Image (cartoon, grey):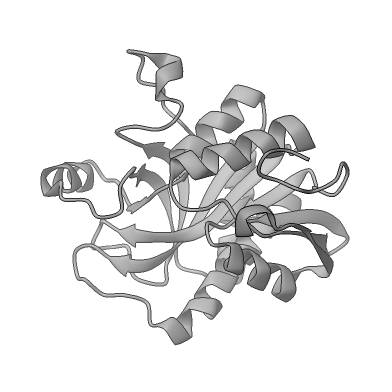
């Protein structure tokens, strides 16, 4: 038991999927896991452990933003022995070729700031995914026939961003999408010798202003969860 996770020793699996929304964790556990049990409710951040195709897995909310994600990733790895952490979440597209409902598999994640920035001082550390997980996620997406993209993303430390100049520059350099957690996840995992990946569903588009209708979200997010599970265990 930690400050933020009330699970008992042994209740967290070595593989953890991390949606930002705790209720999305509940939905994913009920939809994809067999025998899922709630193992954490501290501060309303729900976590569930169950089985997927005979493999033990935990699906645990991480909250919004890198500071929140950092807390859970650190505790899951250091205190509960998590070895594989995969973020499953939504993102906003920054390229015309990336469409709403597409999946983005993030090789790298750029950021202006993260909780780990102080570790490196003037060094610009490049957070990247675990290649083995990324390779399996790509294979899973292809097998499912899901439209997907592989490349760099941007982890923003603000939701209501007014830096259009930065958005334009990132898009010019081929950044596929923006979200708020992956850069810190990749950095924390690297620091502790764990594997990490972000598999993201495009829920809205910064260029066209299109947004995924609420009734379509579960189906689209379901593809993302299955790709993440196949990446971990396939």
Image location (x, y in percent) of residue 31? 71, 75
Please tell me which residue is depicted at 33% across the width and 60% down the height of the picture. Answer: 92
Please tell me which residue is depicted at 24% across the width and 55% down the height of the picture. Answer: 160
Q: Quadrant of the N terminus?
A: top right
Image location (x, y in percent) of residue 80? 78, 37
Q: Is residue 219 positioned above or below 207 on the image? A: below
When asked about the image quadrant of residue 195, the answer is top right
Q: Is residue 216 positioned above or below 202 on the image? A: below
Identify the residue at the far left of this view. 165
Q: Is residue 31 left or right of residue 153?
A: right
Please tell me which residue is depicted at 42% across the width and 72% down the height of the picture. Answer: 101
> Foreground residue, 228 or 118?
118
When asked about the image quadrant of residue 130, the answer is top right
Q: Is residue 92 positioned above or below 122 on the image? A: below
When asked about the image quadrant of residue 152, the answer is top left
Identify the residue at the far bottom of this view. 215
* Residue 145 visible to an observer of this rendering: no
Identify the residue at the far top of this view. 122
Q: Is residue 163 left or right of residue 109?
A: left
* Residue 168 visible to an observer of this rendering: yes
């Amino acid at each position: 038991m930690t400050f933020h996770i009330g699970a008992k020793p042994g209740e967290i699996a070595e593989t953890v999927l991390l949606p930002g929304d705790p209720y999305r964790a509940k939905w994913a556990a009920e939809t994809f896991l067999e025998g899922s049990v709630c193992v954490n409710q501290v501060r309303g951040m729900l976590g569930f452990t169950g089985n997927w195709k005979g493999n033990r897995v935990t699906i645990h909310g991480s909250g919004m933003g890198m500071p929140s994600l950092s807390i859970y990733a650190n505790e899951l790895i250091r205190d509960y022995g998590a070895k594989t952490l995969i973020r499953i979440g939504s993102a906003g597209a920054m390229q015309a070729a990336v469409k709403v409902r597409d999946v983005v598999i993030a090789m790298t994640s750029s950021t202006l700031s993260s909780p780990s920035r102080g570790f490196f001082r003037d060094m610009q550390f490049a957070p990247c995914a675990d290649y083995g997980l990324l390779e399996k996620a790509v294979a899973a997406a292809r097998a499912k026939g899901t439209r997907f993209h592989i490349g760099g993303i941007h982890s923003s430390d603000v939701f209501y961003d007014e830096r259009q100049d930065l958005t334009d520059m990132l898009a010019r350099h081929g950044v596929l999408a923006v979200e708020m957690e992956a850069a810190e996840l990749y950095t924390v995992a690297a620091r502790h010798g764990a594997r990490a990946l972000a598999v993201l569903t495009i829920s809205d588009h910064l260029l066209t202003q299109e947004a995924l209708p609420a009734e379509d979200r579960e189906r689209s997010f379901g593809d993302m969860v299955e790709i993440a599970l196949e990446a971990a265990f396939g």
